Amino acid sequence: MASIKETSSIVTLTHPDNKETSVTILKYGATVYSWKREGVEQLWLSSAAKLDGSKPVRGGIPLVFPAFGKNTTDKYLKDLPQHGFARNSNWTFKGIVRSYPPTVQFELNEGNANRELIKAWPYKFTILYNIELGYDHLKTSVDIRNESDVPFDFNWLFHTYYNIQDSIENVYVHGLENQATHDNITGKAAVEKNAEVIIDREVDRRYLNVDVKENITILNKKTNQLVHGLIRENLSDAVVWNPWIKKSAGMGDFEPKDGYKNMLCVEPGHIHDLVTLRAKQKWSASQYMY
Ligand SMILES: O=P(O)(O)OC[C@H]1O[C@H](O)[C@H](O)[C@@H](O)[C@@H]1O
């Protein structure tokens, strides 16, 4: 039997076959902020991250909904903060929904979402968020249902911060060659020429419409061994982000300051356009990390 520990602010799930394999979720944002596989932390978390609900967590897996970045054009989304309101809302813990692999569920709807922020977005919805702790993987899945009588538009993205135990200089990202990119720093579109995407400066790049059959992996430069692997369902875009020296220096909740050497965000999402979800319809997506 998996063990679950729940406090007023967090839920920890431990794998039945290995007590060193666990996942910890903050109810605020339903933010997974630790995933240990056989005792080894897989996610990066800033030592200055706020875990008290005063701001979104700097690290782990913040959830981005219903807007990615700062939307400036949509009638309602433009009044929301960067990355929407899911990561700044207290989600309801629904308990364990499967015993093997042990899976826990959280729910967000217009009733429990951040009261100030939800004022800007006049829809009824239910998001069920499942976190499955495998022996060798973590799968996070989402079902979004439009409970309104009219369609609504949204982005979804898992803002995953991977822990790069070995330094960022020693890894590369694979699976993005020939993909269309949009650089969030320069605003320019391009095509990725590299089979091995290295991170040696600030990188903030959207990869658009990347075939979901392609796994995205982080590999060791010298040995080509797998550091992290990602399988996506219904999430055709991916952001690759590392704030590097200057940007992380400017973030009050980013510590230690050289932490950029030990993290890399690879964020699967649907952000090349807005998903339109018709009344009473459901949209589902997941990321499987191994
Ligand atoms: O600082 P935050 O609001 O958490 O955003 C952190 C980062 O998220 C994404 O990766 C964006 O592409 C970046 O432009 C942004 O800086």
Image (spheres, grey):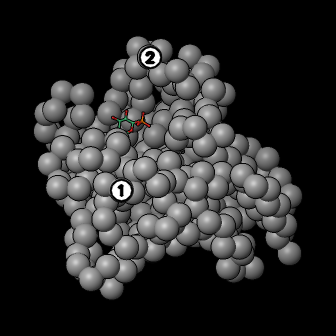
User: What residue is shown at x 40% (from left), y 51% (from top)?
Assistant: 117
Residue 250 drawn at (x, y percent): 44, 17
Q: Position of residue 12 (x, y in %)?
A: 76, 57
> Which mark, by number, is residue 119?
1
Kindly tell me whether mark 1's CB lies below 8 Å from ligand 1. no
Q: Is the residue marked by circle 1 packed among few (<14), some (14-19), or many (20+) residues within 10 Å?
A: some
| Pointer 2 residue | 250
* Quadrant the N terminus occupies: bottom right
114 with respect to 93 (left or right)? left
**143 is higher (above) or lower (below) than 155:** below
Q: Can you name the residue that lies furthest to the bottom here?
A: 280
Q: Is residue 66 left or right of residue 51?
A: left
User: Exactly how many numbered labels are in the figure?
Assistant: 2
Please state the horizontal and vertical placement of residue 280, each as a whole percent of the image: 33, 85
Q: How far, Cα to Cα, is label 2 from label 1? A: 30 Å
Label 1, secondary structure: give it: loop
Spot occupied by residue 35 in the image (x, y as percentages of width and height) = 68, 51
Question: Neighbour class for label 2 at 10 Å: few (<14), some, many (≥20)?
Answer: few
Would residue 50 be visible to someone looking at this image?
yes
Ligand 1 occupies quarter: top left
Q: Sequence order check: which comes first, mark 2 or mark 1?
A: 1
User: What's the residue at 62%, 34% (across, down)?
Assistant: 50
What amino acid is found at the position of numbered circle 2 in the picture? Gly
Specify the amino acid type for callout 1: Lys
Q: Residue at x 48, y 43 (%)?
A: 218
Q: Nearer the viewer, residue 88 or 242?
A: 88
Asked if residue 196 can be seen in this view, the reply is no
Front residue of this view, candidates 182 and 248? 248
Q: In the image shown, does 105 or 189 lie closer to the viewer?
A: 105
Q: Nearer the viewer, mark 2 or mark 1?
A: 1
